[in-house]
Amino acid sequence: MKYSKILLLIVFAFFLTGCDVTYNLEITNDYMTESVDFWYEDTAENEAIIDQYLAVDHQAYFDMNLSLNYNYTQKKITDNNKVGMNLRYNYSGDNLQKSSLIDRCYYKKSVTVTDSEIVLYTDGKTSCLYMDDNKLFDSLTINIKTDLPVIENNADEVNGNTYTWKINEKNYQDHPINIRISRETQEEGFNFWIIIIIAVIICLIILIALGIIYIKNRKNNKI
């Protein structure tokens, strides 16, 4: 079941041409959300194939320990003269390592989550652009978004808190993804809220003191 669903995605790509893929990954301290858009020319034939594909569930990852499938949330998307589909899943811990889409695109990859940092890296070619010399996708754009501190990265572009890699037929043979992110520990989070609470208390004390002084001054002026 695991590999048949991955194979279905590969076979599906052969029936549709001119595909552009946008892979969005949002990383927070507690989860990673994978949201992938597949875009094609808006034709009746393409719409029919997409509808057929979305008529069944598709696996985000397979848990070997529990022998359970975890499926994507999926929907049809449209934009001007394009039609496509979106696959979305919310991962916890380092389960992104098991993503069926990442597994298809990168034979060598690692997702490591420790108490102090999150590290993602790939090595080798981006294998999902071609299969047996047949082009599956025209381009692949990878966006990793995070509000956490980024220690290292090799992104092609950085726009605010979004790190972008652009992969195509010219560079897919050797265009690795590397990003190292500092993870907020529970102690750091606790200390942050302690500071906020203390600051609020100090502000309240100052406001109360100013109020008392103001009231006393008014009384003295009346006398």
Image (tube, grey):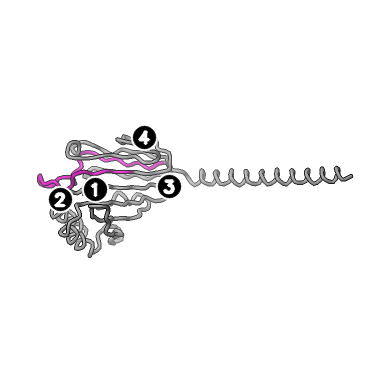
Image quadrant holding the C terminus, namely: top right
In which image quadrant can residue 155 be found?
A: top left
Q: Secondary structure at mark 2?
A: loop
Mark toward the start of the polypeptide (1 vs 3): 1
Give the vertical position of 116 relative to 43 (above or below): above
Q: Residue at 10% of width from left, 44% of height from top?
A: 133
Q: Magenta residues, as a range? A: 117-143
Mark toward the start of the polypeptide (3 vs 4): 3
Q: Which residue is mark 1?
A: 21
Q: Residue at 28% of width from left, 39% of height from top?
A: 165
Q: Amino acid at mark 3?
A: Asn
Residue 64 appears anywhere in the view: no
Q: Which residue is mark 4?
A: 152
Give the vertical position of 43 relative to 149 (above or below): below
Q: Which residue is mark 3?
A: 29
> Closer to us: mark 1 or mark 3?
1
The Cα–Cα distance between marks 2 and 3, rounded to whole angstroms, is 38 Å
> Closer to us: mark 2 or mark 3?
2
Do residues under tags 3 and 4 come within 8 Å of each other at their CB atoms? no
Q: Which percent across, then down, holds residue 23?
A: 28, 47
Q: Residue at 77% of width from left, 46% of height from top?
A: 212
Q: Secondary structure at mark 3?
A: loop
Q: Which percent across, then down, holds residue 16?
A: 15, 53
